[in-house]
Amino acid sequence: MSKMIQFFDTTLRDGEQTIGVNFSVAQKVAIAKQLERWGVDCIEAGFPIASTADFEAVQEVSKAVKHTTVTGLARAQRGDIDACVSATQAARHRQVHVFIATSPIHREAKLHMTKAQVLATIDEMVRYARQFFEVVEFSPEDATRTEADFLATAIQTAIDAGATVINIPDTVGYTNPVEFGQLFDFIQQHVASFNEVTFSVHCHDDLGLAVANSLAAIAHGATRIEGTINGIGERAGNAALEEVAAALHVRHDYYQVDDHIQLSETWATSQLISQAAEMPIPHNKAVIGANAFAHESGIHQDGMLKNPQTYEILTPASVGAPKTTLPLGKLSGSHAVMQKLQQLGYQIDAQQMSAVFAQFKRIAEQVDIVCDADLKAMMANFETGVA
Ligand code: KIV
Ligand code: ZN
């Protein structure tokens, strides 16, 4: 049996840290229900200590979802953990996500703490959290800029104190797939209890590598992936979970892992988040962009008409997206143009074809996309002998 990968969705927490995004409690509940339909294993519904709205959202999401685990985020402080305890009270399955930064820049510039103080805080706060939660996730924030040996010590300290999930955040999107894989190998070799807990990753997209880094971590032992839908999140955002899910599906031969994601719910999930966040999806966005299943060039359209697998590694139906389109533009070939005219009810014989196609090309030079109305007008001119 292949390994199971857990999906941890933080659209409602890290995703809401996107500039200009502010979900209402009702929107958060609707999104959480859709995330549950999509099949995520854990929803980070907010940061309960941060505001009453965040607290209420975590509370309402905890009541609304049926089998998905709900978590709140907590700094390594009693008050934050207490807020998570109360906010997740109604959840059927719950966990807490405790974090403290471990990198030198964060220790010195932000926390003003020594290494020993950071370790003592991890020990004390993870032990405290374990009194209330069976599942305690610990994150050494800015892990990828932390000294590797200190990172291993921080992780072992958290495990010894009772952490059951260790999340490795690439907080500032600094690492790359090769280096991140090596960091996982190092952790595996230097953390004696590596196999006793779940290893998770949380990658940011500052250099456009969040999904690639997350996939590299899977290949090196991580079994939980954190991210957001449409990749929304702080600065350049988080790993786009729909891309991770599609990659694991399309390249099952390579990753050989399974998950609980219902891929056919991907498009609906992405649309819901785009609308609630008021963030349109770029047309060329992988998996869920409007052009992800659209082909314009003649060579590609010809291939698609002969066998869609020539240019599509994923069917639109598999992710619940609208059907493939072959928009007609100046690069389109006669095969696609004739097929479209036939669909519109025109019978074009071999003799007419080159004249019709030449006229199509003249029109296509002047507009971005030749629409049905343009084609009908073109054919009307042919029929009346104007063209
Ligand atoms: O990016 C980050 O480091 C975080 C932590 C709270 C896990 O969001
Ligand atoms: Zn983050």
Image (spheres, rainbow, N blue to C red):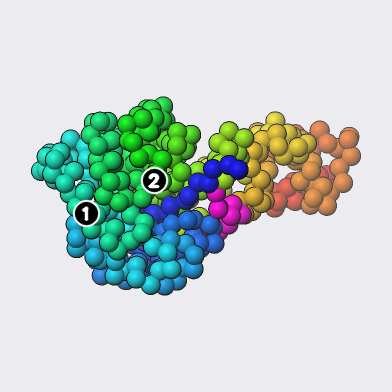
Considering depth in this image, is 218 or 308 the residue closer to the camera?
218
- Label 2 sits on what residue type? Val
Residue visible at 15% across and 38% down? 115
In the image, taking residue 385 as reference, residue 202 lies left or right, namely left
Element marked by disc 1: helix
Q: Residue at x 46, y 68 (%)?
A: 65
The residue stretch that appears in magenta: 259-269
Q: Which residue is mark 1?
A: 125
Q: Main secondary structure of the magenta part?
A: helix
Image coordinates of residue 165 in percent, x first then y, are: 37, 49
On the image, which quarter does residue 182 sit in? Answer: top left
**Observer able to see residue 323:** yes
Q: Nearer the viewer, residue 346 or 197?
A: 197
Name the residue: 29% across, 41% down.
Answer: 155
Compared with 56, 242 (above or below) is: above
Answer above or below: position of 198 versus 28.
above
Q: Is residue 7 left or right of residue 201?
A: right
Q: Given the image, on which type of amino acid does mark 1 rest?
A: Met
Q: In the rendering, at what x and y percent does residue 96 appear?
A: 32, 58
- Helix, strand or loop at label 2? It is loop
Residue placed under numbered mark 2 in the picture: 197
On whether ligand 1 comes within 8 Å of the CB at mark 2, the answer is: no
On the image, the x and y values in percent for residue 98 come to 28, 53
Residue at the image position 36 percent from the left and 56 percent from the top: 135
Point out residue 197 in the picture as x, y percentages from the top left corner.
39, 45
Disc 2 vs disc 1: Cβ atoms closer than 8 Å?
no
Dot 2 alpha-carbon crowd within 10 angstroms: few under 14, some 14 to 19, many 20 or more: some
Relative to 97, 307 lies left or right: right
Q: Can residue 174 be seen by looking at this rendering?
A: no
Q: CA distance from mark 2 to mark 1?
A: 18 Å
